[in-house]
Image: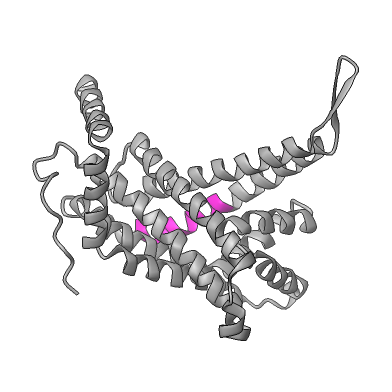
Amino acid sequence: MVCNVMRTSGARAIYVASHPGAFAWRVLRAFRANQALLLAGAVAYYTLLSIVPLLILVIIGLSEIVNRGTLLATVGRYLRWLIPGQSTAVVAELARFLDRRGAISWVLLATMILCSSLAFTVLENAMSVIFLHRVVTRRRHFLVSAIIPYCFIVFLGTGLLLMTLVSGFIETIGAGSLHVFGRSWSLIGASGVLLYLLGVIGEIFVATSIYLVMPVGPLSWRHALIGAVTATALWEVIRQLLIWYFATLSQVSVVYGSLTTAIVVLASLDVAATCLLLGAQVVSEYERIGAQSGHAAPRSLQT
């Protein structure tokens, strides 16, 4: 049985390697048929509603373990990966809220917990559309769907704690120099490269975990990793373009005024959600290679 699985995996890899254009076109056709741009817009909107309550809950929990300034600096550094150009404004709001956290009521806390889970719920629904061939044959209990968002919140909090500790360690090393055979080299540039690589690895790890958990039924970690690498590579290219655009050509503030931060954050989240769902579509089409209906034209959703 293991040999059969390996042969199937090898056959899929050979098919993609020998027909990259056909596979890419197949993915894009299915992506369009699933109206994934609309799904990405929904995910981005609910992520915009969820991101601040989610970060507040995580920071309140971790501030008992890690220094608040260090924690906010780490959040700001990695928010720049998700919302280029506007991370400073979000971190400032988080710091302002933490200054008043003594006034948080149980009602407000419950509201933040509820809002922080909205993005994961919508993302799970979007994944069910992309992985429709799994949903047809499997069902997920509603209690499992209700628990998954809060498990992800704990997972992200743990990941942020590890990122904070590792980033602090890398920055400490980067402040020093390497002495070999009487010569000295500064490690400042090396620490920057390591922090960048740490961020990329974090992106791949989070995307892989989403692809493993959100679709119904067990998914091969190799397939999830393929989708995660695809989504991360695409997002990194687009992210660099967004950074350049907002720094040089953007006139968003002229058009939207005081709404600029919300508009830019929503647009960035929309692009990030599109990359994430496109990676999911790659996984979906990859695992359907060789299936009886794997090469059939995708059926468009009726809206």
Q: Which quadrant: the C terminus?
A: bottom left
Q: Please tell me in which quadrant of the rendered image residue 111 appears.
A: bottom right
Tell me: residue 82, above or below residue 217. below
Q: Residue at x 27, y 38 (%)?
A: 20
Q: How many marks?
A: 0
Which residue appears farthest toward the right when viewing the image? 182
Q: Residue 63: in sight, yes or no? A: no
Q: Residue at x 50, y 71 (%)?
A: 266
In front of the other: 186 or 159:
186
Q: How is the image coloured?
A: one colour
The prevailing secondary structure element of the residues shown in magenta is: helix
Q: Residue at x 61, y 80 (%)?
A: 253
Is residue 114 shown left or right of residue 107?
Answer: left
> Is residue 254 rendered magenta in the image?
no
> Is residue 147 rendered magenta in the image?
yes
Is residue 15 shown left or right of residue 114?
Answer: left
Tell me: residue 84, above or below residue 174. below
Tell me: residue 84, above or below residue 157. below
Residue 1: where, in percent of width, then height? Answer: 19, 22
In front of the other: 6 or 248:
248
Q: Please tell me in which quadrant of the rendered image residue 186 appears.
A: top right
Is residue 186 shown left or right of residue 88?
Answer: right
Is residue 154 shown left or right of residue 142?
Answer: right
Residue 136: where, in percent of width, then height? Answer: 16, 54
Residue 198: where, in percent of width, then height? Answer: 61, 41
Which residue appears farthest toward the top when viewing the image? 181
Q: Please tell me in which quadrant of the rendered image residue 41 appears.
A: bottom left
Q: Residue at x 60, y 45 (%)?
A: 199
In front of the other: 7 or 66:
7
Residue 153: where, in percent of width, then height? Answer: 53, 57
Q: Residue 302: in sight, yes or no? A: yes
Over which residues does the magenta segment extend? Answer: 144-156
